[in-house]
Image (spheres, rainbow, N blue to C red):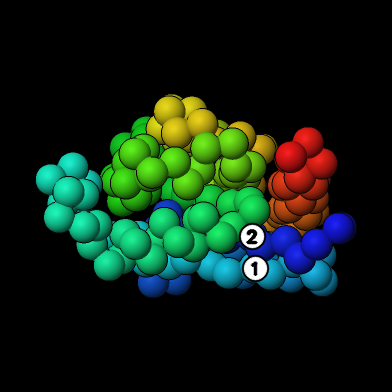
Amino acid sequence: MSRHVTILGICASLQAGSSNLTLLHEAAGLMPADVDFTIFEGLGDIPHFNPDHEADGAPDRVVQFRAMLQAADGVIIASPEYGFSLPGSLKNAIDWTIGTGELAGKPVAVTASVAGLGRGRRGLQALLVPLGAVGAVVVGGEPIVRGSGARAELGLLVAALIEAVEQRESVE
Ligand SMILES: Cc1cc2nc3c(=O)[nH]c(=O)nc-3n(C[C@H](O)[C@H](O)[C@H](O)COP(=O)(O)O)c2cc1C
Protein backbone atom coordinates (compact mmCIF):
# COMPACT_ATOMS: atom_id res chain seq x y z
CA MET A 1 0.00 0.00 0.00
CA SER A 2 1.46 3.34 -1.05
CA ARG A 3 0.44 5.33 2.04
CA HIS A 4 -1.24 5.01 5.38
CA VAL A 5 -4.92 4.04 4.90
CA THR A 6 -7.67 5.08 7.31
CA ILE A 7 -10.85 3.03 7.65
CA LEU A 8 -13.86 4.04 9.73
CA GLY A 9 -16.18 1.39 11.15
CA ILE A 10 -19.76 2.48 11.84
CA CYS A 11 -21.91 0.43 14.17
CA ALA A 12 -25.58 1.02 13.37
CA SER A 13 -26.82 -0.71 16.51
CA LEU A 14 -27.14 1.35 19.68
CA GLN A 15 -27.70 -1.50 22.09
CA ALA A 16 -25.10 -2.65 24.57
CA GLY A 17 -23.75 -6.04 23.62
CA SER A 18 -24.44 -5.43 19.93
CA SER A 19 -23.43 -8.29 17.66
CA ASN A 20 -22.67 -5.73 14.94
CA LEU A 21 -20.24 -3.97 17.27
CA THR A 22 -18.60 -7.32 18.02
CA LEU A 23 -18.26 -7.89 14.27
CA LEU A 24 -16.51 -4.53 13.85
CA HIS A 25 -14.09 -5.39 16.66
CA GLU A 26 -13.35 -8.63 14.80
CA ALA A 27 -12.81 -6.59 11.62
CA ALA A 28 -10.16 -4.59 13.48
CA GLY A 29 -8.11 -7.77 13.82
CA LEU A 30 -8.45 -8.52 10.11
CA MET A 31 -7.22 -5.16 8.81
CA PRO A 32 -3.71 -5.01 7.30
CA ALA A 33 -1.16 -3.87 9.90
CA ASP A 34 -0.66 -0.46 8.30
CA VAL A 35 -4.37 0.43 8.31
CA ASP A 36 -5.59 2.91 10.90
CA PHE A 37 -9.03 1.58 11.97
CA THR A 38 -11.45 3.45 14.23
CA ILE A 39 -14.98 2.47 15.24
CA PHE A 40 -17.66 5.17 15.47
CA GLU A 41 -20.32 4.27 18.01
CA GLY A 42 -21.99 7.68 18.28
CA LEU A 43 -24.96 7.44 15.90
CA GLY A 44 -27.33 7.72 18.84
CA ASP A 45 -25.91 11.14 19.76
CA ILE A 46 -26.43 12.68 16.33
CA PRO A 47 -29.47 15.00 16.38
CA HIS A 48 -32.30 14.55 13.92
CA PHE A 49 -31.40 16.02 10.55
CA ASN A 50 -32.76 19.52 10.11
CA PRO A 51 -31.51 21.76 7.28
CA ASP A 52 -32.27 24.83 9.44
CA HIS A 53 -29.50 23.76 11.82
CA GLU A 54 -27.08 23.65 8.93
CA ALA A 55 -27.53 27.36 8.42
CA ASP A 56 -26.79 28.03 12.12
CA GLY A 57 -23.75 25.75 12.09
CA ALA A 58 -24.06 21.97 12.31
CA PRO A 59 -24.27 20.40 15.79
CA ASP A 60 -20.91 19.35 17.31
CA ARG A 61 -21.64 15.63 16.99
CA VAL A 62 -22.39 16.10 13.29
CA VAL A 63 -19.20 18.10 12.77
CA GLN A 64 -17.25 15.29 14.43
CA PHE A 65 -18.99 12.59 12.38
CA ARG A 66 -18.37 14.43 9.13
CA ALA A 67 -14.71 14.99 10.01
CA MET A 68 -14.24 11.27 10.74
CA LEU A 69 -15.85 10.37 7.42
CA GLN A 70 -13.79 12.96 5.58
CA ALA A 71 -10.56 11.60 7.05
CA ALA A 72 -11.45 8.01 6.16
CA ASP A 73 -10.35 6.41 2.88
CA GLY A 74 -13.01 3.75 3.33
CA VAL A 75 -15.89 2.87 5.63
CA ILE A 76 -17.36 -0.38 6.90
CA ILE A 77 -20.93 -0.29 8.19
CA ALA A 78 -22.33 -3.12 10.30
CA SER A 79 -26.06 -2.66 10.61
CA PRO A 80 -28.99 -4.56 12.07
CA GLU A 81 -32.31 -4.77 10.20
CA TYR A 82 -35.28 -3.24 11.97
CA GLY A 83 -38.78 -3.55 10.53
CA PHE A 84 -37.42 -4.81 7.18
CA SER A 85 -35.29 -1.68 6.83
CA LEU A 86 -32.19 0.10 8.11
CA PRO A 87 -32.08 1.69 11.58
CA GLY A 88 -33.38 5.26 11.64
CA SER A 89 -30.23 6.44 13.39
CA LEU A 90 -28.11 5.33 10.43
CA LYS A 91 -30.42 6.91 7.84
CA ASN A 92 -30.38 10.11 9.89
CA ALA A 93 -26.57 10.19 9.98
CA ILE A 94 -26.35 9.63 6.22
CA ASP A 95 -28.86 12.47 5.68
CA TRP A 96 -26.41 14.86 7.37
CA THR A 97 -23.86 14.07 4.62
CA ILE A 98 -26.15 14.74 1.63
CA GLY A 99 -25.24 18.40 1.43
CA THR A 100 -21.58 18.10 2.38
CA GLY A 101 -20.61 15.01 0.37
CA GLU A 102 -18.22 13.13 2.69
CA LEU A 103 -19.33 9.77 1.25
CA ALA A 104 -19.28 10.72 -2.44
CA GLY A 105 -17.08 8.28 -4.34
CA LYS A 106 -15.92 6.65 -1.10
CA PRO A 107 -15.78 2.84 -0.79
CA VAL A 108 -18.29 1.74 1.86
CA ALA A 109 -18.46 -1.93 2.84
CA VAL A 110 -21.81 -2.97 4.28
CA THR A 111 -22.81 -6.02 6.22
CA ALA A 112 -24.98 -7.20 9.09
CA SER A 113 -24.20 -9.66 11.83
CA VAL A 114 -27.20 -12.01 11.83
CA ALA A 115 -28.41 -15.03 13.76
CA GLY A 116 -29.41 -17.05 10.70
CA LEU A 117 -29.78 -17.23 6.94
CA GLY A 118 -32.39 -14.86 5.51
CA ARG A 119 -32.04 -12.35 8.32
CA GLY A 120 -30.79 -8.82 7.78
CA ARG A 121 -30.83 -8.80 3.99
CA ARG A 122 -33.75 -6.39 3.56
CA GLY A 123 -32.09 -3.95 5.93
CA LEU A 124 -28.96 -3.96 3.80
CA GLN A 125 -31.02 -3.56 0.62
CA ALA A 126 -32.70 -0.54 2.17
CA LEU A 127 -29.31 0.87 3.19
CA LEU A 128 -28.24 0.84 -0.48
CA VAL A 129 -30.83 3.54 -1.25
CA PRO A 130 -29.40 6.40 0.85
CA LEU A 131 -25.83 5.23 0.14
CA GLY A 132 -26.66 5.51 -3.57
CA ALA A 133 -28.11 8.97 -3.04
CA VAL A 134 -24.85 10.22 -1.52
CA GLY A 135 -22.71 8.55 -4.19
CA ALA A 136 -20.95 5.98 -2.00
CA VAL A 137 -19.21 3.07 -3.75
CA VAL A 138 -20.79 0.07 -2.06
CA VAL A 139 -18.66 -3.02 -1.34
CA GLY A 140 -20.21 -6.34 -0.27
CA GLY A 141 -23.76 -6.06 0.99
CA GLU A 142 -24.41 -9.54 2.32
CA PRO A 143 -25.24 -10.36 5.95
CA ILE A 144 -22.75 -12.52 7.86
CA VAL A 145 -24.26 -15.35 9.86
CA ARG A 146 -22.69 -15.59 13.29
CA GLY A 147 -20.73 -18.81 13.76
CA SER A 148 -17.83 -20.77 12.40
CA GLY A 149 -17.67 -19.26 8.89
CA ALA A 150 -18.15 -15.66 9.97
CA ARG A 151 -14.49 -14.73 10.39
CA ALA A 152 -13.60 -15.94 6.89
CA GLU A 153 -16.52 -14.02 5.33
CA LEU A 154 -15.57 -10.89 7.22
CA GLY A 155 -11.97 -11.29 6.08
CA LEU A 156 -13.14 -11.35 2.45
CA LEU A 157 -15.21 -8.22 2.98
CA VAL A 158 -12.30 -6.37 4.60
CA ALA A 159 -10.01 -7.43 1.74
CA ALA A 160 -12.56 -6.22 -0.83
CA LEU A 161 -12.84 -2.88 0.96
CA ILE A 162 -9.06 -2.38 1.04
CA GLU A 163 -8.87 -3.30 -2.64
CA ALA A 164 -11.58 -0.75 -3.50
CA VAL A 165 -9.68 1.92 -1.52
CA GLU A 166 -6.45 1.11 -3.38
CA GLN A 167 -8.27 1.13 -6.73
CA ARG A 168 -9.71 4.55 -6.00
CA GLU A 169 -6.27 5.84 -5.04
CA SER A 170 -4.72 4.52 -8.21
CA VAL A 171 -7.11 6.49 -10.43
CA GLU A 172 -6.89 9.75 -8.44
C1 LIG B 1 -37.76 -3.97 17.19
C2 LIG B 1 -36.92 -4.93 16.41
C3 LIG B 1 -37.18 -5.13 15.07
C4 LIG B 1 -36.43 -6.03 14.32
N1 LIG B 1 -36.72 -6.22 13.00
C5 LIG B 1 -36.03 -7.13 12.29
C6 LIG B 1 -36.34 -7.36 10.93
O1 LIG B 1 -37.21 -6.74 10.32
N2 LIG B 1 -35.59 -8.28 10.27
C7 LIG B 1 -34.57 -8.97 10.86
O2 LIG B 1 -33.95 -9.80 10.20
N3 LIG B 1 -34.26 -8.78 12.17
C8 LIG B 1 -34.97 -7.87 12.88
N4 LIG B 1 -34.65 -7.65 14.18
C9 LIG B 1 -33.53 -8.38 14.79
C10 LIG B 1 -32.23 -7.55 14.79
O3 LIG B 1 -31.91 -7.08 13.50
C11 LIG B 1 -31.12 -8.41 15.33
O4 LIG B 1 -31.42 -8.74 16.66
C12 LIG B 1 -29.75 -7.80 15.23
O5 LIG B 1 -28.80 -8.78 15.45
C13 LIG B 1 -29.53 -6.69 16.24
O6 LIG B 1 -28.24 -6.19 16.03
P1 LIG B 1 -27.24 -5.92 17.24
O7 LIG B 1 -27.01 -7.24 17.95
O8 LIG B 1 -26.01 -5.41 16.62
O9 LIG B 1 -27.89 -4.92 18.15
C14 LIG B 1 -35.37 -6.74 14.95
C15 LIG B 1 -35.10 -6.52 16.30
C16 LIG B 1 -35.84 -5.62 17.01
C17 LIG B 1 -35.53 -5.40 18.48
At label 2, the amino acid type is: Ile
x and y, in percent, of residue 4 in the image: 76, 65
x and y, in percent, of residue 119 in the image: 51, 39
x and y, in percent, of residue 60 in the image: 27, 67
Q: How many C-alpha atoms fall within 10 Å of the one at disc 1: few (<14), some, or many (≥20)?
A: many
Toward the right, the furthest residue is 1
**Tag 1 or tag 2, which sits nearer the N-term?**
2
Residue at mark 1: 37
Q: How many marks?
A: 2
Question: What is the C-alpha distance between the residues marked 2 and 1?
Answer: 5 Å
Residue 7's disc is 2
Q: Is residue 139 visible?
A: yes
At label 1, the amino acid type is: Phe
Nearer to the camera, 16 or 78: 78
Say which residue appears at 34% left-offset and 39% top-offset. 99
On screen, residue 108 above or below 60: above
Callout 2–callout 1 Cβ contact below 8 Å: yes
Q: Quadrant of residue 37?
A: bottom right
Nearer to the camera, 59 or 49: 59
On screen, residue 3 above or below 92: below
